[in-house]
Image (cartoon, rainbow, N blue to C red):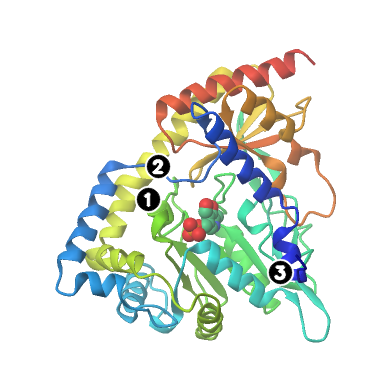
Amino acid sequence: MKLSSFGDKYTGQSGIVDLMADLGEALHTRPDMISMGGGNPARIMEVETIYKNHLINLLKEDDGAYNILGKYQSPQGDELLLKQLAALLRDEYGWPITDKNVAISNGGQSAFYVLANLFAGRFSDGSMKQIQFPLVPEYLGYTDAGLEANFFTSTRPTIEMLGDHVFKYRVDFENMKVTDSTAAFCVSRPTNPTGNVLTDDEIRQLDAIAAEHDIPLIIDGAYGTPFPDIIFDEVSPHWSKNTILLLSMSKLGLPGVRTGFIVASEEIIQAYANANTIQNLACGTVGPAIASKLFLNREVLEISKNIIMPYYKERAFSTMDLFIQAMADLPVYIHKPEGAIFLWLWFKDLPVSSAKLYEILKEAGVLIIPGHDSFAGLKADWQHAHECIRISYAQDAGQVNKGVEIIAREVRKLYENN
Ligand SMILES: Cc1ncc(COP(=O)(O)O)c(C=O)c1O
């Protein structure tokens, strides 16, 4: 098979594709494996029932099945829903947004792919621009999204110790370089994989620097405000004409509907809608139909604030406590859980790499995500990147607790046998 460079890229080696294939294979061959690796949201029955009832009622409406199954959406997405989301953001946050500032996507991943490649990559004069992560670790799913090689640049964070076993990453503004090749900044807030939430001050500074250089600031709010709002402390939502905010329905518990939203300047929304039409023709209709019901009376905000966020907050802190109790005498540090659905563990001076630890834990019956692939764009290797892992606490609590025990046992052996 002869392939273009596009084809080469997608058939070539990719850290994430290999890892995902390995995770899938491991679960297939050992169904008893404790899965703390994936990004699947938790199954929360109370919200599942709400979605199920909306879907049943949608189908019962006159022409219900036809409306959600038999029609293409317009390029930007269902007009009523765009108006609803714009109104929700205006009312909640006072942002000067109309339906022209909003588009629907087939999920956050697909929106990021289109947007990142709109801004970065090869230009007509032959020059190359990159997306910059002001702080890594960042979302693994970005790593191979660029159509060109060397698509990302990034800066190491500073590490602030917050207690015996807790730390927090902060943007290292002093060492962050913006050049003519910087196409955009991108941050996930809350951050996958660390559970970090960039502070209001960090976000304001990033937006100001981006505006000064006439580049956009992409804020991936897959876990953020206004929904699913998996943020444990008070922080301010952020949008400006310079910001591209990505939202998703996945972590509300609806990853199967593949629905996301983009909130940006009219010019960017138009460019996105054109690119999305060429790529996808139109977005799916089931997710937007459920979203429209959830936006009505702001039910989505209630669900997020009163059910989803408290669920993850409790799981985050109880899982962290278990880890700390089990490894109190070891040089193990956990990123302060501020949001999202993961804990990020740092095993300082671990005698093996996180890649090797992944193998050891798989053998012992627990799947995690090794940290080293989450540092895309760093110019030089960093030992810290090989000392961290991401675990999800979204699955069944009994299983997660068992997983914590196994991780603590195996890590202890590694330190003690060194
Ligand atoms: C930070 C971040 N952005 C985007 C996505 C993709 O979400 P979606 O299901 O909307 O494509 C994920 C999924 O885990 C994520 O963690």
Q: Is residue 335 visible?
A: no
Secondary structure type for disc 3? loop
Q: Amino acid at mark 1?
A: Gly
Q: Nearer the viewer, residue 205 or 346?
A: 346
Residue at 44% over, 82% down: 75
- Crowd class of label 3 (few under 14; some 14 to 19; many from 20; radius 10 Å): some
In the image, taking residue 70 as reference, residue 272 lies left or right, namely right
Residue 173, given in percent of the width and then of the height, sits at 72, 58
Q: Report x, y in % for residue 201.
A: 58, 59
Label ID, residue 147: 3
In the picture of the structure, the residue carrying the numbered disc 1 is 253
Q: Is mark 1 within 8 Å of ligand 1?
A: no
Of badges 2 and 3, nearer the viewer stands 3
**Residue 152, how many percent across, how many down?**
74, 62
Measuring from the top left, give residue 248's x and y in whole percent. Answer: 44, 61
In the image, 404 versus 316, the foreground residue is: 404
Residue at horizontal 30%, vertical 79%?
80
The answer to which image quadrant residue 53 occupies is bottom left
